[in-house]
Amino acid sequence: MAVSSRQRTVFVCDACGAAAPKWAGQCPSCDAWNTLVEAPAVGGGGRSPARAASPTGGAAVQALADIDVQAVTRLGSGLPEFDRVLGGGFVPGSVVLLGGDPGIGKSTLLLQSLAHMSGSLRALYVTGEESLAQIALRAARLGLDGGSLQLLAENGLEAMLDAVASIKPAVLVADSVQTFYTDSLTSAPGSVAQVREIAARLVRVAKQSGCVVILVGHVTKEGHLAGPRVLEHMVDAVLYFEGDRSSRFRLVRAFKNRFGAVNEIGVFAMTERGLRAVGNPSAMFIRRGDVTAGSVILATQEGTRPLLVEVQALVDPSTAPNPRRVTAGLEANRLALLLAILHRHAGSSVHDQDVFINVAGGVRINETAADLAVMLAIVSSMRDRPLDPHTVVFGEVGLAGEVRPVQRGLERLREARELGFTRAVMPRANRPKGGSAGIEVVAVKRVTDALAVLEVDRLSRPAAAR
């Protein structure tokens, strides 16, 4: 039911929590600047709808041993890779926050999922950015059969909640949370107070009704979710849509998931018929062909899935006073650290060289197991000595030049063996105790041991191939 009159609001400091009757540039209590945001007044003049009651109702204290744990029935999205990121599907009563760059495919992914789920469940898609005709045109272009999918073009939260109370959907999509507003606040849509209040109200709806709520969020130019940081703490899962819009590959990565593994990824290919799940992403990300200097295959681990990607390095003489260090898919600070280790413990200096690192396919590598592959790629490019294309590399490198073990080493070996690789350069501590049939293991203890593999490959190649 729509709110007939505005509630009294106050301005609360995000830094110290002090309340003020009107906005000011500086908090009168802690002297912090630009921290006062509008919020509903609690007590006396009004009460925040988000705080009107506990999301789970009046709960009693229980002993952990007395709690009956029921098997969670998950709702499949119709896309296996999406279900993988979610931990097996949507959990009833959960709230999922999906963020990503504009045009990356967030609305397409959710429309495909809801069109599939609406065949057996009630699904409601609420859009605050597009018209219903635009959504219908997208569904027709994708060839979706979602005749029972309910659509609503609305920016008001109260009107959305009225529709939810009437339809009682099992799945609700709010696209996007920055475009909605509530009549209980006077600030503009997308402000900190509006986003926080709307998210709190929708979380309460999800917990009380068992409806799956999916919030679409905008991202900043740095790639982080826009709005208050508390938004990510309020929801059950935070997913990021990654990838280059010029590339056909898209990645959905879980940064928070109360019902599944964190850092799990789902790989999709953008086609004329929408997003298609990629069942074997390793085969899509690696290039099997000519031997190229500066190219190394890395066996990385994303959540529970081993993934093979190509790490490319280009080292070129620089004419600038400060040589460039450019990375795509790898943390820039990590590259600076690895270059220092190369100089100190391997005698390979690039102080007068530009260094460019790229992870092919738009994949972003966050784990330190990529250290050894990056260093081998740099030295391979610098010396113009390609690594055997049937070799896979992984391992963390310490500041003393030692190669440290990584987790799930055996699973990485199995993935490489299944894709036809015959050799693995890896930490000595990760060497399988029972042997690894079908793949040669080169166990190294220090960086210099790994770099010696490049010299062995050079000497073993025929003179005509050099």
Image (tube, grey):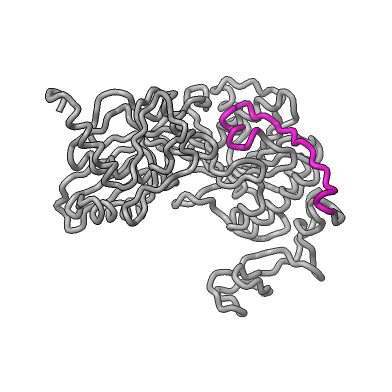
- Measured from the top left, where is residue 175 in percent x and y? 61, 41
Quadrant in the rendering for residue 430: top left
Q: Residue at x 72, y 55 (%)?
A: 183
Q: At 59% from the left edge and 25% from the top edge, which residue is drawn?
A: 139
Whether residue 282 appears in this view of the structure is no
Q: Position of residue 239 (x, y in %)?
A: 57, 43
Instruction: Please say whether residue 76 is visible from this viewpoint.
Output: yes
Q: Quadrant of residue 170?
A: top right
Magenta segment, principal secondary structure?
A: loop
Q: Is residue 100 magenta?
A: no
Direction left: furthest residue:
463
Vertical arrangement, residue 225 with respect to residue 464, above or below: below
Q: Locate residue 346 relative to residue 188 in the image: left or right.
A: left
Looking at the image, which is closer to me, 220 or 424?
424
Task: Looking at the picture, tell me which residue is in the foreground, 253 or 407.
Answer: 407
Image quadrant in which the C terminus is located: top left
Query: Is 450 placed left or right of 366 in the picture?
Result: left
Please indicate whether residue 306 sits to the left or right of residue 230 in the image. left
Judge whether 35 appears above or below 215 on screen. below
The part of the chain drawn in magenta is: 63-88
Magenta segment includes 71: yes
Q: Position of residue 304 (x, y in %)?
A: 54, 37
The location of residue 89, given as percent across then percent down, is 66, 33
The answer to whether residue 354 is above or below residue 36 is above
- Residue placed most toward the observer, 101 or 75: 75
Q: Return the residue nearer the eye: 295 or 17.
A: 295
Residue 227 against residue 39 in the figure, above or below: above
